[in-house]
Image: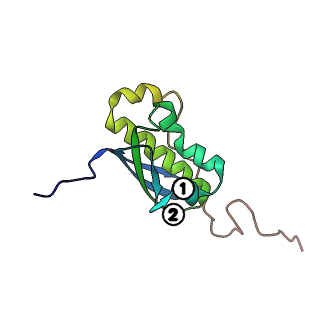
Amino acid sequence: MAEVKNINLGQGTGRRKTSIARVYLREGSGKITVNGRDVSEYFGIESLVVKVKQPLVAVDGLTKFDVVITVCGGGVSGQAGACRHGLARALVNADEANLVLERPTGFLTRDPRMVERKKYGQRGARRKFQFSKR
């Protein structure tokens, strides 16, 4: 029988704007992989890398878990927010005691802000066509 190497301790789905991230939590040494690449290589901006790692720092799990993330849709900032949301959900899924640490920080709350859709008869979401009296 073949051994199963990658046993997921927890998994979570994170969303922000139009980005969706699937996060898988595994035992390991703290390696975070996003779409097959290292987290700092994928996001490039240090503030976004810190944003993704925030839930792990809150539960003191930076060196305890390996994190595998698949993210799609949206832009870089939205993807980082989706990864943070999914990681927080995965940590709670792995251990219910993490709920006490993640809830007050707001990592489990989905950011509801979305781009407002364009309405018919208008130039944009709120912008109107120029009015001409004559």
Residue, disc 1: 79
User: How would you rate the neighbour count of disc 2 (Cα within 10 Å): few for under 14, some for 14-19, many for 20 or more?
Assistant: some
Q: In this view, does 113 lie above or below 105?
A: below
User: Counting residues from the N terminus, which is met first, the one under dot 2 or under dot 1?
Assistant: 2
**Amino acid type of the residue that numbered disc 2 sits on in the rendered structure:** Gly
On screen, residue 96 versus residue 78, left or right, reads left
User: How would you rate the neighbour count of disc 1 (Cα within 10 Å): few for under 14, some for 14-19, many for 20 or more?
Assistant: many
Assign a secondary structure to mark 1: helix
Image coords of residue 63 (percent x, y): 44, 38
Q: Name which residue lies at 67% across and 61% down.
A: 125
The residues bearing labels 2 and 1 have C-alpha atoms spaced at a distance of 7 Å
Is 116 in front, or is 109? 109
On screen, residue 106 versus residue 8, left or right, reads right
Image coords of residue 58 (percent x, y): 50, 31
Q: Name which residue lies at 57% across and 59% down.
A: 41
Is 73 in front, or is 46? 46
Q: In this view, does 11 lie above or below 102?
A: below
Residue 115 seen: no
**Amino acid type of the residue that numbered disc 1 sits on in the rendered structure:** Gln
Q: For the C terminus, which image quadrant?
A: bottom right
Q: Name which residue lies at 33% across and 30% down.
A: 96
Is 6 in front, or is 16? 6
Q: For the N terminus, which image quadrant?
A: bottom left
